[in-house]
Image: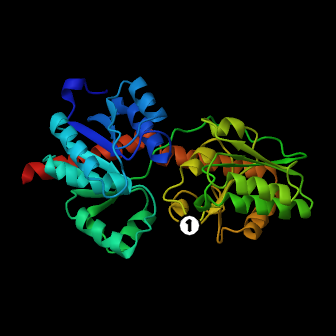
Amino acid sequence: MTPPLAAKRGRVLHILRALDFGGVESQMRIVAAHASLSEWTHSFCAIGPGGAVLEDLRGLGAEARALGCPTKIPSPKAILALALFLRRNRPDMVQLYGAEAIFHGIIAARLARVPVVICEEIGIPRHSAKARRVFARLYRHADRIVAISEAVKRAIVDMGEARPEVIEVVYNPFEPQPFRPYPPLAGRVELGFAGRLEAVKNPMAAVEAAALLRDRGLDFRLRLVGDGSQRRALADRIADLNLSDRVILEGFHPHPFALLEGCHLYLQPSITEGFGLAICEAMSAGIPVIATAAGGTPEVIDHGRTGWLLPVPDAAHLADAVERAIALGPAELAEVGRMGSTSVRERFSPETFMRRSDALFDSLLRDRGRE
């Protein structure tokens, strides 16, 4: 039974750079939507701009605010505004997400005497030598560091920014997609990709792989759902390779997997992934996934059982993996999709995430009480 409001243990304020759109913003939407499962009250603050997710949070009944400050490190204006906001609101703990929120948030929280400070690294950090020294000093003023995968934790430790005993792995939650029976595999093969059209997501490898698959005689269509700085380059490459009849740039869509219904294989040839939200969404829908064995992805996919991992995120390896998967036939592909869906729904559901987060908050509250 969900505890009444009066029985809540305290209030956690989640602080981000912005509340517009993106992976961590989607996580905040999930937290707000499932706040009744938590023994803590959750509120939200963007140091910089608001946007679509800010309005979503308010629509879900959550307290949410955008301060509208500059977020480029360092921003004295952001530190001052955030410190004043924290003094007025007096949360029991803050959780800071990403570099800008961590940098400004730790300083502001300590100035405002917030009892507990949690920092969450939302991806594989790529810090310069100077940034490593800065974050190593900042993290000494945090009560706990959260990593969204074991890969992220290793990266923080390897860079010398924090000791492993102060880092806790809490996997991201995701909202499962409707599970659909595997579509008939007769005629054209439907391939899909969803995500930011940025170099780290490597959508160009999917386009290059499409050219190889066409030259090998495969009848297919590839749909890329998303937007980003590489969209023009992708459009030019599709035209250069004469793939306009086979590769479709769908653009941004708030519900990308609605466009990928009937997909036979989902492709994620990222250079790296801190966790892999879109991978989990595709798997939950029953779509077999081919993704790069980088970052946190091997913690999501059991190679050969719940999907397939690419050793190298290039077009040749991706095209080979697609051919091998299609050769398995619809029955085995459907079984991989079913097992993948079961796996991510059990391990990364909002319910599992809220329980895990509450356990972290409770342990920090107990530690604070013993001081």
Q: Is residue 90 visible?
A: yes
Considering only vertical position in the picture, is 119 above or below 30?
below
The image quadrant that residue 214 belongs to is: bottom right
Question: Where residue 178 sits: x, y (%)?
Answer: 62, 34
Question: Where residue 72 sits: x, y (%)?
Answer: 37, 55
The residue identified by callout 1 is 294
Instruction: Please give left or right for residue 337 compared with residue 243 in the image.
Output: left
Residue closer to the observer: 124 or 55: 55
Considering only vertical position in the picture, is 52 above or below 82?
above
Tell me what residue is drawn at x 44 percent, y 46 percent: 24
Three-letter code, disc 1: Ala
Q: Which SS class for mark 1?
A: loop
Question: Where residue 189 sits: x, y (%)?
Answer: 83, 49
Q: Is residue 360 visible?
A: no
**In what quadrant of the picture does the C terminus appear?**
bottom left
Counting labels gives 1
Instruction: Please give left or right for residue 206 compared with residue 89 in the image.
Output: right
**In what quadrant of the picture does the N terminus appear?**
top left
